[in-house]
Image: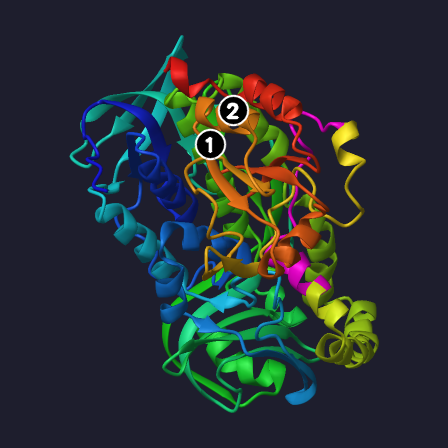
Amino acid sequence: MIMDQSPDNTTEVLIVGAGPTGLMMACQLAVHQVSFRIIDKNTTSSQNSGALIVQARTLEIFEQLGIAGEAINQGIIADRIDILYNAKKIAGTSIKNIGQKLSQFPFLLMLEQSKTEKLLLKFLEERGCYVERNVQFRSFTEDKGSITTDVIMPDGSGQKIVSKYIIGADGSKSAIRNFLEIPFKGKTYSRPIFILDCGAITDISSGVISFAFSKASVAGFFPLGDHRWRVDGSFPERIKKSKVITLETVTKGLQRWNNLNFRLHDTEWFSVSHSQQKYARTIRIGNCFLAGDSAHVNTPVGAQGMNAGLQDAHNLAWKMAFVLKQKAKPELLDSYSTERLGITKGFARHSDKVFKLVTNTNIAIRLFRTYILKMYFKKMFPKLANKEKSRLKFFKSISQIDIHYKPAYGTYKDLEKLFSRGTPKPGYRFPYLEFIYDNKNTNSHHILDASGFTLLVLAEELTPEIKSISEKYNLKVVLIKKLAETEKIYTTLGIKYSGFYLVRPDTYIALRSATMDSGHLSRYLEYLLIPHAIL
């Protein structure tokens, strides 16, 4: 469906920042037919590998947009992870399809950020939307019901943009966050790291993510295709003390630091930076919201940052659209903060330890890294290779499919006690299952409505009450009868005879019942949504 993006000075949503998070926000709003403008201070989109790893949860969101296949075609599915010590492989494990049965995308996809942004831009352009570049945010004021934002246009002239909401998706140095004086607390690591995109002649296998350890340095090597590589690495102690670190420093030193045959050439991007782990104290003030790096930044360990930002946008956009379209009460937007504030902190506790371990040049840490960590890798990787439980645990921790929220509107204990332990609860992502429905192969995500609530009813027929509620709130209803080919989904969801699951547009479970009693469903929807009939 084509959606005209009006250049008028009045719009429903103003998005500041056109990196992956801002672009995802724009794509989601376009799906919901919400008017917006998206501005960015830069003249072009990303031109480098940037946030390279696309996790399974992000690919599930891409699938809702219809771009997952194209993303996979343009990227590289990581085949395995190898650990090298002084250029010798000491451990390795296959990670291809490591999350089998947990997601439609049971792998890590290496897709350069420049390509990710192009895919999202293409999605917008096909719907008549575009990014306004070289536009600088200055300030905004919020009155009852509207926000007036002052920006500087490419020709230097000023312009006022009036919107209902404003989204700060403008990165770790967010002008929106700074304007609102929201504290951004955390740490900046004292030890610098380097990142480069380059061509290389090397013995390192393509399709393999390799981590090379030596007494002097640690580096990660990620294939980009066509003999191109992304390299992230730490510096030896003597280099860190240098006041100036140049590309030549890395070009001459990389092979020597890691004892590798890696002759780089044609460097496309080079960066030296100090990683950060910081969080905004709040991600909402009035009708202004923060998302992505403006709300949280993390170390490169685990490749969580961009993926978390894309989920921020996915979480916020449908709620904002529902409120703007008068499908839901304004209180729905309160759940964005309760669900997404500090969402990466749990994983960050582990990544902080790992990052310190691989970048610290303290002699005791270096000895630990050289000997104890080496033994750990030798012990751990066979477990990943041979034990399905260990593989699935690793995939869940890194893929972001296991992120869950405390139900914003509480749970009903009398409903929950009917479910056995281990079945998917409210606040959790609806599980991925493949099954036959209506004589066709499908999966549990494909049958959900990406733009509205889905009521998944597991029963022989719909009750009159459930029919009435579904019509009242315009719910998509999927009736799954208990048959041999659907028995698996009944078992996984903990439905013995009949019941239902209410699933949000972002595939998270809102409510469930192991009976066909619709009383709690009616009260939940009455609290949250506005009946379709009175619109």
Could you tell me which residue is drawn at 71 percent across and 38 percent down?
Answer: 514
Residue 47 % position (x, y): 33, 60
Task: Name the residue tied to disc 2.
Answer: 469
Marked residue nearer the N-terminal end (1 or 2): 2
Q: Nearer the viewer, residue 222 or 153?
A: 222
In the image, farthest residue toward the top: 144
Q: Quadrant of the N terminus?
A: top left
Q: Nearer the viewer, residue 449 or 23?
A: 449
The secondary element bearing badge 1 is classed as: loop
Q: Is residue 506 visible?
A: no
Q: CA distance from mark 1 to mark 2?
A: 8 Å
Q: Quadrant of the C terminus?
A: top left
Q: Quadrant of residue 364?
A: bottom right
Q: Nearer the viewer, residue 517 or 22?
A: 517
Q: Residues within 10 Å of mark 2 (few under 14, many from 20)?
A: some
Could you tell me which residue is drawn at 31 percent across and 40 percent down?
Answer: 41
On residue 475, the disc is: 1
Q: Nearer the viewer, mark 1 or mark 2?
A: 2
For badge 1, the amino acid type reads Leu
In this view, 470 is above or below 378: above
Q: From which residue to which does the magenta span run?
A: 393-412
Question: Is residue 320 shown left or right of residue 98?
Answer: left
Task: Based on the picture, tell me whether residue 404 belongs to the magenta stretch.
Answer: yes
For badge 2, the amino acid type reads Ile
Q: Are marks 1 and 2 in contact (CB under 8 Å)?
A: yes
Q: Main secondary structure of the magenta part?
A: loop
Could you tell me which residue is drawn at 56 percent across and 66 percent down?
Answer: 106
Q: Residues within 10 Å of mark 1 (few under 14, many from 20)?
A: some
Residue 169 % position (x, y): 43, 38
